[in-house]
Image (tube, grey):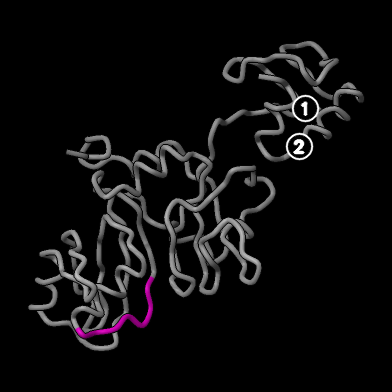
Amino acid sequence: MRLDKLIASQGKYSRTDVKKLIKQGLIVVNGKTATTSDEKVDPDSAEVVINGEPFIYKEHIYIMLNKPEGVVSATDDKVHKTVLDLVPPELFRDGLFPAGRLDADTTGFVLITDDGDFAHKILSPKNHVEKTYIAELADSISEEDILKLESGITLKDGYECLPSKIKLLGEKIIEIKICEGKYHQIKRMIGATNNRVLSLKRVQIGALPLDIDLRPGNCREITQEELGEITTKNGTYFYAE
């Protein structure tokens, strides 16, 4: 890979920045001062130092955001603030997108990445990666309605949802786990029981919970170990059929 492309791919420097740094003699590759931006380097083995600081290459990045209310899960919006607007410069790079969407008024865990293959795997219903939400309801929920939700409720438009998992946390508060991501799905599921969602927060993806120390609007990088918590269950990768 070209040196300028390698460095620019991580988001902190542009290709123009790289050329300026090379002219200043501030980039060292495998112990030698770089002289040209099109120098070919191996992303996996090259030792690059920029202005005295080791350069660390990551093919992809995975970010946990605690989405606040009013922010849209999109890469661009002319009216509203997007989840990408909340990514700090040190984590930002081209190609980032939210892996799955939360409604503007839904809060909590949004995973942002530039890895399309990974996003597809965790979003595909056939891979059964559960997303866990806490929902506050307008009315108390009956055992009968819980059974309907857990059996795979049929929405008012005729769509048959996959079975969900429900835990009653309070008279009008439930934890609900689903492995689909249809438009307004949980709100529509609850609506099919003649109830209504007052507030909704995603608190976990797979087995990885939202960091309790992450304030609304803040985000941090997800570690490789934590990625394993998203994509595995009982040691089975994506536990797909």
Q: Is residue 161 above or below residue 41?
A: below
Type of amino acid under label 2: Tyr
Residue 13's disc is 2
User: Pointer 2 and pointer 1: residues touching (CB < 8 Å)?
Assistant: yes
Magenta-highlighted residues: 194-200
- Which quadrant holds residue 58? top right
Comes first in the chain, label 2 or label 1: 2
Q: Position of residue 88 (x, y in %)?
A: 66, 53
- Which quadrant holds residue 149? bottom left
Badge 2 element? loop
Residue at mark 1: 50
Q: Nearer the viewer, residue 185 or 90?
A: 185
Type of amino acid under label 1: Ile
Q: Nearer the viewer, residue 81 or 54?
A: 81
Q: Is residue 197 magenta?
A: yes
In this picture, residue 7 sits left or right of residue 213 = right
The image shows a total of numbered marks equal to: 2
Q: Nearer the viewer, residue 138 or 183?
A: 183
- Which quadrant holds residue 178? bottom left
Q: Position of residue 99 (x, y in %)?
A: 45, 51
Viewer-side label of 2, 1: 2
In this picture, residue 158 sits left or right of residue 108 = left
Q: Position of residue 10 (x, y in %)?
A: 65, 35
x 23%, y 35%: residue: 235
Q: Position of residue 132 (x, y in %)?
A: 30, 61
